[in-house]
């Protein structure tokens, strides 16, 4: 006898058994809970809220929305929490048939679960004052099925809702699929990819300053130079403050300099940067100063006067900047 | 600019002050705050809105002059002007008003500043979200923002590190400014930090925002509005309150000035903009630092309070670290500063609340009144083109 057949037989043995103890509703059917429900659902059929409208429709009083059926016998948050706590203390309640079926399915590898469908059949409308009790039997356990979610078995419970007279007022078939994870046609949802890191703030580029950023893309640290008097200037400007010439070109810096001042940024933390972030005012050996990041060193060891040299870093395809590292020689 | 003698100096006065409460969430529009503060300032002066013919604010203010005028029924305006450069504008608005009044362009000018700087647009968030539409103002940030230097605290810290390196000032020396401010705020019911003084140890233990600045080196963020009424001294003498005479008012930008990042002069230990303002204030008023009984020194961040004290000549270059010791800048000391609690303690109103405190000291109305006040010096935001003011008692 194959193992699958054994499982089939084991499962079949539970069909028709009571799934678990009967559950009594915490409260009789009542108007306040009905009101909460219709407000939450936005279903304002007057027969749920207005006695007169209900009588005009042929009911003795307001009636409960039929789909509230399960709400009347739910255990409530506190009871559920108590049961959970009891389980954690190892005080497991008597194992029900439903528990045993679930456990068998788990052991056979059908460890995932999804509720698939629920059919309700109503014998009569529920009215305030009705007291419900629900019993449940295991209606069926299917053979192994191949589904979109994976290979699994359907487990169906049949629930009967009875009133204070013991009459059946509604029945419900509730079906779940227990399946083997990762065996379905639809792959498990891919791990959400880490959001791409936001880019560093963009420099606003004008005819006055874009040469610097173009140079940086080519690994060059460029300084603006007045072609009339030779004065170097940074940040760039349209005219020379020394001789008033508007003519200029650029020279390439050696990239060697010293730290003139620096800060260690802690807050606010902008996602484009790593913190603590060292930003320094570098005095280049050519005499101009510029703001740049410092690399290859911890914040605690940065000092004013430290000799540094530039390397270029491409932060993204549009932005390259010099980053200064402790001088090697 | 040289041999300065300003015609408005001594002939114009502040006649009214008004402010909303200072909060972290005003629950009303910036315009509402502006109108409310202007209304209160006019009531303080005893001037009807219909008599106002001039309005001045900051270019960074979001409340148009014409909306203020319409809200309060001011009628015709003959003078409106705005001052640029953020918190540097403060005393500059008073100078604009005084110039207009002295020149006969307007009779009553109200200066105002109102914002929801805490619940709305927070300056401390930095310029990261700014769309780089290319012009000279945005291109400026190309040298700082891509490198991660994004906030006012960070821009100031760069200069502070150098200042501390050169002068030997320590974080504790910066902390003494915060302690003085918070001591004064603690006895000012209008201050956000009313009854909440701090110790130097608490300053030192507060978290880093940007080294070398701790959290308690940084001013708070505030929702609120403040307005100041300027008119002629002659007119002011007939109004509700004793006039606060405008003895001097000046604007200044230094050599190679940048907006918060003047990093390219030989020396990174001074404030060229305040040097310019100081020279004009002393020249036009004929006063000296010894004539000042109390001062409101713009305190967005503590380091520039030290630098300003030096630029204004209250002490020598590099000596502020000693000047602020032993409670010298606290009530009862040689030069009590920021007796309202400053922007660290009372509120961050872009310095306008400091001008109001100067007026209260001149009137003898401060909750932390300094004895025998004759002259009060008030400064505006530094690190940017700035302004300053000397107010005097009418004798």
Image (cartoon, coloured by chain):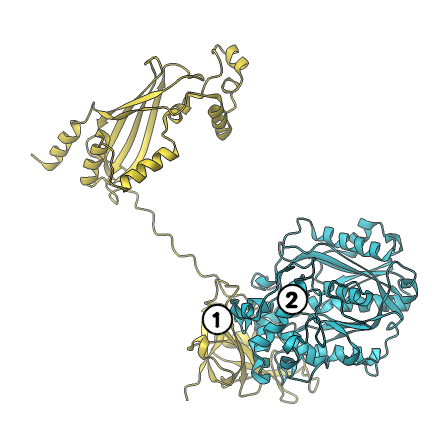
Q: Chain of mark 2?
A: B
* Residue behind mark 1: A277
Tag 1 secondary structure: strand
Q: Nearer the viewer, residue A138 or B256?
A: A138
Chain A painted colour: yellow
Q: Is residue B143 left or right of residue A314?
A: right
Q: Quadrant of the C terminus of chain B?
A: bottom right
> How far across and how far down the image is residue B230, in percent?
84, 63
**Residue at the image position 60 percent from the left and 74 percent from the top:** B174
**Residue B183, numbered label:** 2
Q: Is residue B321 left or right of residue B206?
A: right
**Residue at the image position 67 percent from the left and 84 percent from the top:** B317
Chain B painted colour: cyan
Q: Quadrant of residue A240?
A: bottom right
Q: What is the tally of numbered marks visible in this picture?
A: 2
Q: Quadrant of residue B40?
A: bottom right
């Amino acid at each position: 006898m194959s193992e699958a057949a054994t499982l089939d037989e084991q499962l079949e043995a539970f069909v028709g058994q009571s799934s678990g103890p009967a559950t009594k509703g915490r409260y009789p059917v009542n108007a306040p809970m009905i009101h909460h429900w219709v407000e939450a659902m936005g279903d304002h059929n007057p027969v749920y809220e207005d006695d007169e409208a209900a009588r005009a429709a042929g009911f003795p009083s307001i009636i409960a929305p039929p789909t509230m059926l399960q709400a009347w016998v739910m255990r409530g948050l506190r009871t559920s929490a108590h049961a959970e706590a009891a389980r954690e203390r190892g005080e497991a309640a008597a194992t029900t048939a439903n528990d045993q079926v679930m456990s068998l399915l788990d052991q056979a590898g059908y460890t995932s679960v999804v509720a698939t469908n629920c059919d309700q059949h109503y014998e009569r409308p529920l009215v305030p004052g009705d007291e419900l009790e629900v019993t449940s039997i295991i209606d069926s356990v299917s053979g192994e099925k191949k589904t979109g979610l994976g290979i699994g078995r359907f487990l169906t419970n049949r629930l009967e809702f009875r009133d204070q007279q013991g009459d059946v007022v509604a029945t419900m078939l509730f079906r779940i699929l227990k399946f083997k994870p990762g065996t379905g046609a639809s792959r498990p949802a891919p791990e959400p990819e880490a959001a791409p890191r936001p880019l560093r703030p963009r420099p606003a580029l004008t005819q006055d300053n874009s040469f610097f950023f173009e140079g940086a893309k080519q690994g060059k640290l460029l300084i603006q130079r007045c072609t009339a008097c030779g004065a170097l200037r940074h940040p760039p400007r349209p005219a020379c403050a020394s001789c008033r010439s508007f003519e200029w070109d650029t020279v390439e810096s050696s990239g060697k300099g010293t730290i003139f001042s620096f800060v260690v940024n802690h807050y606010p933390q902008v996602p484009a940067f790593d913190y603590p972030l060292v930003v320094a005012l570098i005095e280049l050996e050519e005499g101009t100063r510029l703001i740049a990041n410092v690399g290859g060193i911890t914040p605690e060891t940065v000092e004013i006067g430290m000799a540094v040299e530039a390397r270029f870093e491409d932060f993204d395809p549009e932005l390259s900047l010099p980053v200064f590292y402790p001088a090697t020689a | 600019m040289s041999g300065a003698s300003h015609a408005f100096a001594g002939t114009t006065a502040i006649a009214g002050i008004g402010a909303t409460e200072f909060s972290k969430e005003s629950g009303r529009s910036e315009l509402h705050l502006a109108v409310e503060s202007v209304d209160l300032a006019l009531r303080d002066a005893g001037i009807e809105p219909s008599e106002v013919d001039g309005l001045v604010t900051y270019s960074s203010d979001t409340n148009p002059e014409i909306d203020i005028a319409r809200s309060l029924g001011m009628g015709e305006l003959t003078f409106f002007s705005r001052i640029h450069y953020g918190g540097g504008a403060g005393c500059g608005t008073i100078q604009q008003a005084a110039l207009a009044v002295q020149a006969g362009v307007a009779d009553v000018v109200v200066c105002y500043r109102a914002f929801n700087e805490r619940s709305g647009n927070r300056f401390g968030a930095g310029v990261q979200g700014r769309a780089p539409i290319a012009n000279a103002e945005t291109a400026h940030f190309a040298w700082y923002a891509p490198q991660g230097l994004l906030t006012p605290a960070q821009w100031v810290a760069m200069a502070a590190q150098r200042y501390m390196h050169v002068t030997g000032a320590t974080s504790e020396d910066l902390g003494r400014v915060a302690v003085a401010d918070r001591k004064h705020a603690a006895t000012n019911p209008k201050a956000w930090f009313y009854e909440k003084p701090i110790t130097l140890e608490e300053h030192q233990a507060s978290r880093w925002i940007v080294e070398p600045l701790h959290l308690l080196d940084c001013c708070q963020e505030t929702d609120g509005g403040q307005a100041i009424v300027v008119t002629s001294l002659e007119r002011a003498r007939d109004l509700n309150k004793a006039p606060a005479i405008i003895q001097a008012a000046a604007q200044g930008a230094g050599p190679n000035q940048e907006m918060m990042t003047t990093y390219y002069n030989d020396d990174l230990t001074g404030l060229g903009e305040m040097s310019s303002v100081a020279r004009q204030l002393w020249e036009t008023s004929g006063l000296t630092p010894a004539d000042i009984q109390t001062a409101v020194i713009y305190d967005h961040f503590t380091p520039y309070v030290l630098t300003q004290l030096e630029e204004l000549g209250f002490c020598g270059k590099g000596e502020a670290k000693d000047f602020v010791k032993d409670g010298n800048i606290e009530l009862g000391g040689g030069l009590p500063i920021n007796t309202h609690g400053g922007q660290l303690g009372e509120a961050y109103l872009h310095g306008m609340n400091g001008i109001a405190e100067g007026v209260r000291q001149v009137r003898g109305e401060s909750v932390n009144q300094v004895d025998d006040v004759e002259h009060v010096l008030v400064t505006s935001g530094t690190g940017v083109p700035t302004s300053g003011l000397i107010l005097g008692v009418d004798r």
